[in-house]
Structure formats: structure tokens, C-alpha cells
Image: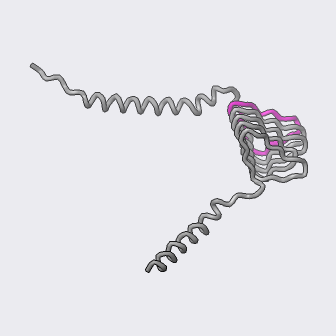
Amino acid sequence: MLQQTSRTIFRFLAISVLLAAPALAQKKSDRFQFNHDIIVEPGETSGDLECMNCSIFVRGEVAGDVSVIHGNVVIEHGAKVTGDVSTVLGDLRLQSGSQIQGDAAAVGGTVRRAPDATIRGDITSLGGAGWVVLIVFLPLALIGGFVAFIVWLIARMRRPAPVAA
């Protein structure tokens, strides 16, 4: 009986690992950095790039998306990004001859490009930190106000009503 239970548990674990493997798989060329710049050298091809509190410098090719929070993206001369590029609290700069095949967005920053740089998708530039306040802090303030209102209602319902004499 114990041996049969062990086999059942082993089979369950094996099936779980096999089903989870594709979800946990990551292309070797994808990169994520925190507080450390990412540089894609000329002739190098990379997958998706994500960076927090740092910058990304593309001199080669990125076969995926580029995302940065609190940093800049610089796509240098002749470099290419086949996906979308987005920055939050940072700038996006395209030097001459550089290409973005997807969309380009900068929230709390600007999109600057040389005249011969190409962006095939949409360009969105919401400069200034005011947008970050509207996008992040305003919803949090509304949720906080809603919670305070519910607490006030509950406290009001728990108070005893005055008895008329």
C-alpha cells in the first residue's frame, strides 16, 4: 500500500513538472537586470530585455521587446529592435539609422530620434512625472478613500442609536 502511494505521488510530481516546464522555460537570450545596465554589442542578437533602475544600450539586434523602469533606452547607430520599446520614468533615444519594428512609448520621459531613424509602430510620449502620479498614485488614493468610506460606514452602524425620552 505504501509503495502504491509513493508511485502515485511520484507520477503526480512528474506530470506537474512536465506541465510546468514550458511555463518556466525562458529563452537563453532574454535578459533582466536590476541596478546594472544592459549592453547589446554590435553583431550580437538578444531576446527580450527588461531593466529596473538602469539603462539599456542597443548596438546590435534585439529580437523581442525592450522594457525599462527608471532608466533610459538608447538604440545606437544601425541597431534594430524587432519588438516594442517602453520606458517608465526614462527617455528613449534613437540614433541615426536605428530601427524599431514595433511601438515606442515613454511615460514620464520623451522619445527622441534622429531624422533617419525609423519606428514602424505607434509613438507615445507622456513627458513629465505628472503622468506617473496620475497613473499610479491617483488610483491608490481612490482605493484608499473607498476603504476609509467603508470603515466610516461600519463604525457608524456599530454606534448605538440615542433613545428618545
Residue 34 lies left or right of residue 98; in this view the side is left
**Residue located at (41% from left, 33% from top):** 147
Q: Percent position (x, y) of residue 74?
A: 82, 38
Looking at this view, is 34 or 164 the one in front?
A: 34
Looking at the image, residue 155 sits to the left or right of residue 69; the answer is left
Residue 61 pos. (x, y %):
84, 50
Q: In which quarter of the image is the N terminus?
A: bottom left
**Corner quadrant of residue 103:** top right
Rendered residue at 80%/45% (across/down): 100
Q: Is residue 43 above or below residue 55?
A: below
User: Can you name the residue that lies furthest to the left here?
Assistant: 165
Q: Residue at the location (54% across, 74% down)?
A: 11
Quarter of the view holding residue 38: top right
Q: Give the range drawn in magenta.
A: 105-125
Residue 126 location in percent, x, y?
69, 31
Image quadrant holding the C terminus, namely top left
